[in-house]
């Protein structure tokens, strides 16, 4: 498992998330990240995304630690990935909408080029971000593999039926692309 300063990674993700939304959108507005297709171009609506349910996670990817072992928060100097951040809370509904949007893109490439972090989706106070943790010219995975990581975070970092903690996990099969769900 990769180890790095979780505080610097989360701060970077949150900073990009905050700067990506210069003017706050209404709380229920769905917004794809830069370069990502619109719902209209996919023939989908936000309602379709809500009704899709959860993404199936392959058992081999799902074989990780229990939630209590994932919580690191400010107590840790370094943290293992996957992780849940118990000092960041966000609504689950927006996270699942974004997960389903990214999954609907299927084998399309979800890439982070150049910069360290890129917002992939925003909805209802939640953002899914991709981080190029080795600062390569570009990192990419099939969007369905990104959705698996995001669904794993959603499933394992939940607080209750309404809220969840922020979290991070690598895109399935790609240790260079760190996926995070963070508050906006």
Image (cartoon, rainbow, N blue to C red):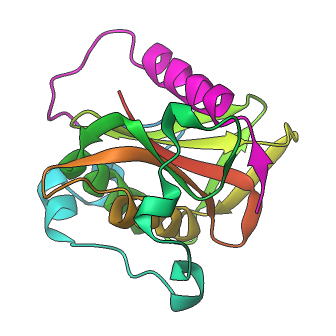
Q: Which residues are magenta?
A: 1-29
Horizontal and vertical percent position of residue 92:
23, 50
Tell me which corner region of the image, top left, top right, bottom left or bottom right, holds residue 114. Answer: top right
Q: Is residue 12 magenta?
A: yes
Q: Does residue 47 sit above or below 165 in this rendering?
A: below
Q: Is residue 110 something that shows in the picture?
A: yes
Q: Quadrant of the N terminus?
A: bottom right
Q: Does residue 29 sit above or below 11 in this rendering?
A: below
* Relative depth, front residue between 80 and 60: 80
* Relative depth, front residue between 121 and 183: 183
Q: Does residue 89 sit above or below 83 in this rendering?
A: above
Using residue 37 as the reference point, say whether residue 174 is left or right of it: right
Using residue 31 as the reference point, say whether residue 170 is left or right of it: right
Horizontal and vertical percent position of residue 5:
72, 35
Horizontal and vertical percent position of residue 3:
77, 49
Horizontal and vertical percent position of residue 49:
22, 60
Q: Is residue 56 magenta?
A: no
Tell me which corner region of the image, top left, top right, bottom left or bottom right, holds residue 124. Answer: top left
Q: Residue at x 62, y 29 (%)?
A: 7
Q: Does residue 47 sit above or below 23 in this rendering?
A: below
Q: Residue at x 27, y 38 (%)?
A: 90
């Amino acid at each position: 498992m990769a180890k790095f300063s979780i505080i610097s990674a989360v701060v970077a993700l949150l900073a990009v998330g905050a700067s990506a939304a210069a003017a706050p959108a209404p709380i229920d507005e769905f917004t794809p990240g830069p370069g990502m297709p619109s719902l209209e171009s996919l023939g989908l609506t936000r309602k379709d995304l809500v009704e899709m349910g959860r993404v199936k996670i392959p058992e081999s990817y799902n074989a990780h630690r229990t939630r209590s072992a994932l919580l690191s928060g400010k107590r840790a100097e370094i943290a293992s990935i996957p992780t849940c951040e118990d000092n960041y809370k966000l609504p689950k509904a927006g996270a699942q909408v974004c997960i389903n949007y990214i999954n609907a893109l299927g084998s399309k490439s979800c890439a982070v080029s150049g910069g360290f972090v890129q917002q992939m989706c925003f909805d209802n106070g939640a953002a899914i971000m991709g981080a190029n943790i080795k600062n390569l010219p570009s990192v990419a995975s099939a969007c369905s593999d990104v959705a698996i990581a995001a669904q794993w975070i959603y499933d394992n970092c939940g607080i209750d039926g309404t809220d969840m903690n922020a979290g991070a996990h690598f895109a399935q099969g790609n240790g260079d692309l760190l996926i995070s769900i963070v508050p906006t």
